[in-house]
């Protein structure tokens, strides 16, 4: 997924989106009026999203677990760091 320069895109991601995806060109990190990321766990039994910074990128991940360990995982990599909750990303 690509965000063009000087726009204010809205990305909606959820635990239903399996696999790994990358968002490049995320605009306005840490400032109001830039791109926004809405993160949701859609049902009561869905995993809580985890937001972390690793190697100059921000990763949002969802993992389902069973007694045998992780069952599946969805993750999004944003090619920026410094994203702020309630400015750049929001939990639904």
Image (cartoon, rainbow, N blue to C red):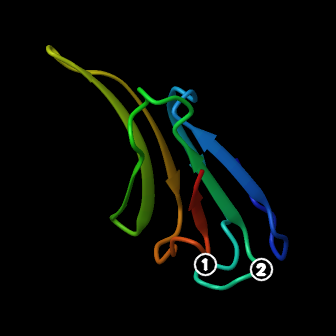
Q: Which residue is mark 2?
A: 33
Q: Is residue 24 above or below residue 26?
A: above
Check the image and name the residue furthest to the front: 44
**Residue 58 placement, left or right of 13:** left
| Mark 1 element type | loop
Mark 1 or 2, which is nearer the eye?
2
Q: Nearer the viewer, residue 5 or 34?
A: 34
Q: Is residue 3 visible?
A: yes
Q: Which residue is mark 1?
A: 29
Q: Is residue 60 above or below residue 83?
A: above
**Residue 19 placement, left or right of 47:** right
| Residue under the point 51% across and 33% down | 15
Check the image and name the residue furthest to the left: 68
| Residue under the point 39% across and 42% down | 48
Q: Quadrant of residue 32?
A: bottom right
* Disc 1 residue crowd, few under 14, some 14–19, many 20+, Cα 10 Å: some
Check the image and name the residue furthest to the bottom: 31
**Residue 72 placement, left or right of 86:** left
Asked if the residues shown at circle 1 and circle 2 are in contact, with their CB atoms under 8 angstroms apart, the answer is no
| Residue under the point 79% across and 61% down | 9
Q: What is the x, y in percent for residue 23? A: 62, 53
| Mark 2 element type | loop
Cα gap from disc 1 to disc 2, whole angstroms: 9 Å
**Residue 62 placement, left or right of 27:** left
Count of all numbered marks drawn on residues in the image: 2
Q: What is the x, y in percent for residue 28? A: 68, 79
Q: What is the x, y in percent for residue 83? A: 51, 73
* Disc 2 residue crowd, few under 14, some 14–19, many 20+, Cα 10 Å: some
Q: Is residue 12 above or below residue 45?
A: below
């Amino acid at each position: 997924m690509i965000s063009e320069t000087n726009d204010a895109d809205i990305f909606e991601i959820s635990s239903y989106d399996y696999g790994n995806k990358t968002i490049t060109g995320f605009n306005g990190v840490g400032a109001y009026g830039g791109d926004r990321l809405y993160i949701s766990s859609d049902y009561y039994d869905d995993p809580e999203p985890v937001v972390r910074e690793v190697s100059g990128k921000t990763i949002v991940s969802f993992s389902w677990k069973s007694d045998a360990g992780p069952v599946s995982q969805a993750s999004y990599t944003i090619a920026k760091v410094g994203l702020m909750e309630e400015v750049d990303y929001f939990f639904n």
